[in-house]
Image (cartoon, rainbow, N blue to C red):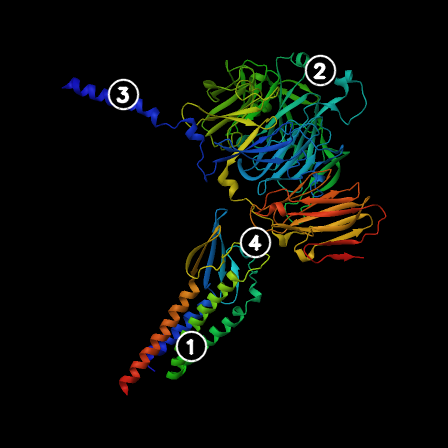
């Protein structure tokens, strides 16, 4: 009897154990979004050398949108239309390309709030603001005295500042010097940009620092609010063959910057105003929506020696890349890309070390703290090539390991490795939604890889970069999905769709369009000659342009098509293209006015048409513009339908 | 007139005031790409959309089949109806105040006539919009008219058009019924006393 009971009990437990896994969802089920349902998260992946931000749904991995930021984008005319081309203006002239690296969502109380997305541009140092009501770039600020804007854009928990720091030290200000005299002339800058005022992004101050390479950053929160941390490498100050010459030292530094102290120094006048020239480009999100460039002429420099307490160096092994602050703000994890351990610094220890003056030396007035005095622990034998760390909000840290192609998962307080998952291959950054904020949504992990041999269908010598999605909500990470990526994503941010969807804009109100060339009704459409400029005030609505016949343009004229989409219906943009246009097409949203500049070279009759399939009669949405020879006396004539207006 | 009849006609007039604040009829157009529906709301003195731009978008879609533009300013009923109902409300209160039975009978007969006439006019208006098509319309389907239903739903090409009376019409119905009941009560009371 007793044996029978035991057997029954045993069978029940065994049956339970066998059936539990079968109740769990398969990866395919977890990433499948049924028709009409939305993804849970929006993920914003930087495009790297494509200069853009690419938006994906998670967990499906579906590409939703590409947001042009630093690169001209023919799909919608960004950078080509008269309303957007000022966005790409810099002190080096108009630049249609950028290298975008680190997106960062705006935060309130350390939590992503869905107002804006910021992103840096490395090559021609710039930062941008994207308005998440429309997923459009509305502001770009150039960073002077920077040789490459890499440690950017990392945000303070109140969105007051975003960071920018030069990756490459250069002569500051620039001058003609022998490269071999690097140590004598080359400097770095750490920049703090005021970010919480849309349209008024501005450099609050720059800190002039030793000529190292500054790599990445993260700002403190909670107890470490008021501080930001920047990694540096090449403290050897090599200027050639850095792969050897910048990998000599056992420890480089994490620069701990007390920006509250910096604010004090600015208030006390302990700074130097320096003349320079840099661009601030702003496109108002409503009104005329015409981007403008404002030239700024000076920045405030803080010299650490003259502002004691503004900055300390934390020795960190070895050539650190990423620096990440735990959600509680107490720990600072460095990713020493050549290190065999993962060093975790304690913010509390750092403050004590500063108080007790536990210094190991000083560079240019910046105290170097003793490693042992600030280090909380070293995670032993984690992996090879640790780079970046994100957090799941449940006490676990996830560090990407480039060389060993895996992600190591550990308890950062206890300094104990818990698990690891493979990546395919050579992982750079990794992302957990909210994973660098005070409150991560620790459901998914997305490592982003540089090499994808044997994962995807080959496409010649170049294969796509890729990301892998893991479900980390359970006790064991579960591999869900391979995602191809556009460009070379360096970092990503993600936020619940529910936060963004509430803010989404459906149309631009035509009544509020204050563009000087807006045409709000077909009756108001007209063609105006001003010297050798011809301004066409045109409307687009399903399924015609007004006017759709234009005459009186001559070779040598500059023609401006100011096209207003007078639709007020969601998801009805109209396109505009004209034969021989040497810029791009336009994609005009309902209620918006965009302008295409066109310079006809030869007499003839040129067709123009709508490029976005708008309605059943989209194919009929077309017109003609007649170009006469120079000096011809054809009057300006325009119209749609029977009546043609003649301008004498 | 008894105090009950006077009370009822007064109440009928008070309820009738509600039609200046509530819509009379709603026509909604659904299509695969308009799941949320494009809505046209008819009031006693105006026509509005479910969103500020619905009317504009309905007109935009209607132009493909050659329907006339719905321009609230060009519909005379929207100017006449508020006056008519204003008069009825005034007449109702006057009846209640004076207790004049003849006025009450007049009110009851008038409201019946107005009700029937309004519905007939509405039907003609819909008929005109649905049948009076531009001969140069891009989409022409032989024998096809686009008259929306007055009550219920109907498929018109890719749209499902649904029309239902709204709060204002129900208020009007209640008001009219109360007035007519009042008149009937008076009528029978009179016969009894004679």
> Among all residues in the image, which is located at the extreme left?
A1
Location of residue A353 with respect to A133 vertically, above or below: above
**Residue at x-position 72% and y-position 16%:** A239
Label 4 – label 1 distance at C-alpha: 41 Å
* Badge 1 element: helix
Label 4 – label 2 distance at C-alpha: 71 Å
Label 2 – label 3 distance at C-alpha: 64 Å
**Residue corresponding to mark 1:** B110
- When asked about the image quadrant of residue B57, the answer is bottom right
Q: Nearer the viewer, residue B53 or A55?
A: B53
Asked if badge 4 and badge 3 are on a common chain, one would say no
Q: Earlier in the sequence, mark 2 or mark 3?
A: 3
* Badge 4 element: helix
Disc 4 to disc 3: CB gap under 8 Å = no
**Label 1 lies in what chain?**
B
Which numbered disc covers residue A238? 2
The spot of residue A122 in percent (x, y) is 67, 28
Q: Earlier in the sequence, mark 4 or mark 1?
A: 4
The spot of residue A580 in percent (x, y) is 73, 39
**Label 3 lies in what chain?**
A
Label 1 – label 2 distance at C-alpha: 100 Å
**Label 4 lies in what chain?**
B
* Badge 2 element: loop
| Viewer-nearest of discs 2 and 3 | 3
Disc 4 to disc 2: CB gap under 8 Å = no
Disc 2 to disc 3: CB gap under 8 Å = no
**Residue corresponding to mark 3:** A14
- When asked about the image quadrant of residue A388, the answer is top right
Which numbered disc covers residue B64? 4
| Viewer-nearest of discs 4 and 3 | 4
């Amino acid at each position: 009897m007793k044996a029978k009971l035991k057997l029954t009990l045993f069978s029940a437990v065994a049956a339970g154990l066998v059936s539990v896994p079968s109740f769990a969802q398969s990866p395919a089920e977890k990433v499948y979004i049924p028709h009409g349902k939305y993804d849970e998260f929006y993920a914003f992946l930087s495009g790297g050398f494509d200069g853009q931000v690419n938006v994906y749904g998670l967990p499906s991995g579906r590409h939703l949108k590409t947001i042009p930021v630093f690169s001209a984008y023919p799909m919608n005319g960004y950078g080509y239309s008269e309303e957007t081309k000022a966005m790409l203006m810099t002190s080096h002239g108009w630049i249609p390309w950028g290298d975008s690296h680190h997106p960062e969502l705006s935060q309130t109380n350390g939590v992503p709030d869905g107002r804006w997305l910021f992103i840096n541009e490395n090559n021609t140092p710039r930062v941008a603001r994207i308005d998440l009501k429309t997923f459009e770039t509305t502001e770009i600020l150039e960073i002077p005295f920077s040789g490459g804007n890499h440690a950017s854009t990392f945000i303070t928990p109140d969105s007051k500042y975003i960071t920018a720091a030069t990756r490459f030290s250069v002569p500051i200000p620039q001058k003609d010097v022998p490269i071999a005299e690097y140590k004598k002339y080359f400097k770095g800058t750490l920049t703090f940009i005021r970010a919480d005022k849309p349209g008024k992004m501005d450099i609050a101050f720059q800190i002039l620092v030793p000529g190292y390479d500054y790599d990445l950053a993260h700002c403190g929160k909670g107890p470490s609010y008021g501080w930001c941390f920047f990694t540096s490498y090449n403290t050897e100050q090599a200027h050639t063959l850095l792969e050897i010459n910048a990998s000599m030292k056992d420890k480089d530094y994490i620069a701990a910057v007390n920006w509250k102290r910096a604010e004090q120094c600015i208030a006390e006048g302990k700074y130097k105003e320096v003349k320079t020239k840099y661009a601030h480009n702003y496109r108002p999100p409503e009104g005329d929506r015409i981007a403008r460039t404002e030239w700024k002429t000076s920045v405030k420099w803080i010299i650490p020696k003259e502002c004691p307490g503004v900055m300390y160096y934390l020795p960190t092994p070895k050539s650190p890349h990423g620096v990440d602050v735990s959600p509680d703000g107490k720990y600072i994890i460095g990713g020493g890309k050549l290190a065999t351990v993962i060093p975790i610094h304690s913010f509390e220890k750092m403050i004590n070390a500063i108080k007790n003056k536990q210094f190991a030396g000083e560079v240019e007035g910046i105290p170097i703290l003793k490693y042992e005095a600030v280090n909380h622990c070293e995670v032993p034998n984690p992996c090879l090539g640790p780079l970046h760390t994100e957090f799941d909000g449940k006490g676990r840290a996830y560090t990407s390991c480039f060389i060993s192609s895996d992600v190591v998962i550990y308890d950062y307080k206890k300094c104990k490795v818990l698990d690891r998952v493979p990546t395919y291959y050579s992982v750079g950054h990794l992302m957990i939604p909210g994973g660098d904020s005070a409150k991560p949504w620790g459901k998914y992990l997305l490592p982003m890889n540089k090499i994808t041999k044997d994962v995807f269908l080959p496409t010649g010598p170049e294969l796509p970069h890729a990301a892998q999605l893991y479900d980390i909500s359970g006790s064991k990470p579960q591999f869900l999905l391979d995602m191809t990526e556009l460009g070379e994503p360096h970092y990503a941010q993600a936020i619940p769709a529910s936060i963004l969807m509430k803010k989404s804009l459906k149309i631009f109100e035509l009544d509020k369009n204050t563009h000087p060339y807006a045409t709000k009704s077909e009756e108001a459409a007209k063609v105006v000659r001003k010297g050798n400029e011809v301004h066409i005030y045109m409307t687009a609505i399903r399924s015609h342009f007004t006017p759709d016949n234009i005459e009186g343009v001559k070779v040598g004229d500059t023609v401006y098509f100011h096209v207003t989409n007078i639709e007020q219906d969601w998801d009805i943009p109209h396109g505009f293209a004209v034969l021989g246009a040497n810029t791009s097409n336009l994609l005009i949203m309902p209620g918006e006015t965009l302008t295409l500049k066109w310079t006809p070279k030869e007499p003839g009759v040129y067709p123009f048409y709508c490029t976005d399939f708008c309605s059943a009669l989209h194919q009929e949405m077309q017109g003609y513009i007649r170009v006469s020879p120079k000096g011809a006396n054809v009057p300006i004539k325009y119209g749609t339908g029977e009546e043609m207006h003649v301008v004498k | 007139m008894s105090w009950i009849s006077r009370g009822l006609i007064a109440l009928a007039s008070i309820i009738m005031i509600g039609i200046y604040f509530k819509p009379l009829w709603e026509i909604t157009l659904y299509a695969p790409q308009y799941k949320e529906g494009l809505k046209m709301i008819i009031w006693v003195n105006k026509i509005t959309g479910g969103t500020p731009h619905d009317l504009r978008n309905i007109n935009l879609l209607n132009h493909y089949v050659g329907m006339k533009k719905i321009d609230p300013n060009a519909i005379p009923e929207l100017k006449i109806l508020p006056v008519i109902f204003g008069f009825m409300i005034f007449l109702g209160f006057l009846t209640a105040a004076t207790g004049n039975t003849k006025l009450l009978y007049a009110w009851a007969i008038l409201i019946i006539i107005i009700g029937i006439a309004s519905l007939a006019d509405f039907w003609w208006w819909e008929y005109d919009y649905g049948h009076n098509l531009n001969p140069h319309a891009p989409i022409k389907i032989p024998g096809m008219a686009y008259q929306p239903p007055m009550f219920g739903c109907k498929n018109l090409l890719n749209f499902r058009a649904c029309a239902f009376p709204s709060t204002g019409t129900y208020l009007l119905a209640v008001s009219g019924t109360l007035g007519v009941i009042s008149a009937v009560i008076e009528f029978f009371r009179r016969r009894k006393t004679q």
